Amino acid sequence: MLSDLLASNRRWAAARVSEEPDYFRRLSGLQHPEYLWIGCSDSRVPANVITGLQPGEVFVHCNVANLVHRGDLNLLSVVEYAVETLRVRHVIICGHYGCGGLRAAMDGGRHGIIDHWLQPIRDVAEANREVLSGIADNEARHRRLCELTVAAQVEGLSRTPIIQSAWRRANPLAIHGWVYDLGDGHLRDLSCTRAVAARP
Ligand code: CO
């Protein structure tokens, strides 16, 4: 019931104020998150909940299958604002095993407009055909493609003019690739971090 959501909201707000009377005054005055999260729209992967971050601590952008399309004005606007104005220190691109977008990209079927959106996943699969075809187990292959896709988005984002110009100005921003396991709730760092090279 929608009315349950509104009632739940009132209880949540009252609990925050009882813990800290100035809670909303403090938060409404300023947001100063250290992190930009680029994740899947999947309802099972809510950034704040799985990282334990509070309101005000993470700037969030979601789309189907956490993709970085370099012509996506929505994503680019979010990234520019996060980097230039909020001055986040870390961008986390987070994929997840069991991603429906990833499965739809690879199932050979037709789903509509989303097939265009998901094309970068098929490009990653094509570029890594040998590695992937060597994995006999379907689920293991899906997981590997998920990781490879995240790593490709990290690489792609790092090459955008927004990030390149931030790094030229020695902004210490780092871009990380993570994956979330729906099965156990664990996040894992894929060790594909990109950051500005240390100056000699
Ligand atoms: Co997903």
Image (cartoon, rainbow, N blue to C red):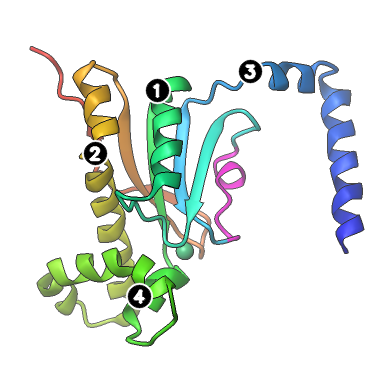
Which numbered circle lies on residue 105? Answer: 4
User: Could you tell me if residue 128 is visible in this image?
Assistant: no
For label 1, the residue is: 84
Q: Quadrant of the C terminus?
A: top left
Of helix, strand and loop, which one carries label 2?
A: helix
Left or right: 137 with respect to 62?
Answer: left
Range covered by the magenta-colored residues? 43-52
Residue extending furthest toward the top:
200
Q: CA distance from mark 2 to mark 1?
A: 15 Å
Inspect the image, locate mark 1, and give the three-letter code of the amino acid beneath it.
Answer: Glu
Would residue 114 be counted in the magenta stretch? no
Q: Residue at x 51, y 63 (%)?
A: 182
Evaluate if marks 4 and 3 touch, with contact meaning CB atoms under 8 Å apart. Answer: no
For label 3, the residue is: 30
Q: Is residue 50 above or below residue 82?
A: below
Evaluate if marks 1 and 3 touch, with contact meaning CB atoms under 8 Å apart. Answer: no
How many residues crowd around disc 4 within 10 Å: few (fewer than 14), some, or many (20 or more)?
A: many
Of helix, strand and loop, which one carries label 3?
A: loop
Look at discs 2 and 1 and give the one toward the viewer: 1
Q: Residue at x 27, y 23 (%)?
A: 166
Observer-nearest of 103 and 82:
82
Of helix, strand and loop, which one carries label 4?
A: helix
Inspect the image, locate mark 4, and give the three-letter code of the amino acid beneath it.
Answer: Ala
Residue extending furthest toward the left:
200
Q: Is mark 1 within 8 Å of ligand 1?
A: no
Task: Give the mark nearest the N terminus, 4 or 3.
Answer: 3
Asked which quadrant contains residue 191, the reply is top left
For label 2, the residue is: 158
Inspect the image, locate mark 2, and give the three-letter code of the amino acid beneath it.
Answer: Ser
Task: Give the mark nearest the N terminus, 2 or 1.
Answer: 1
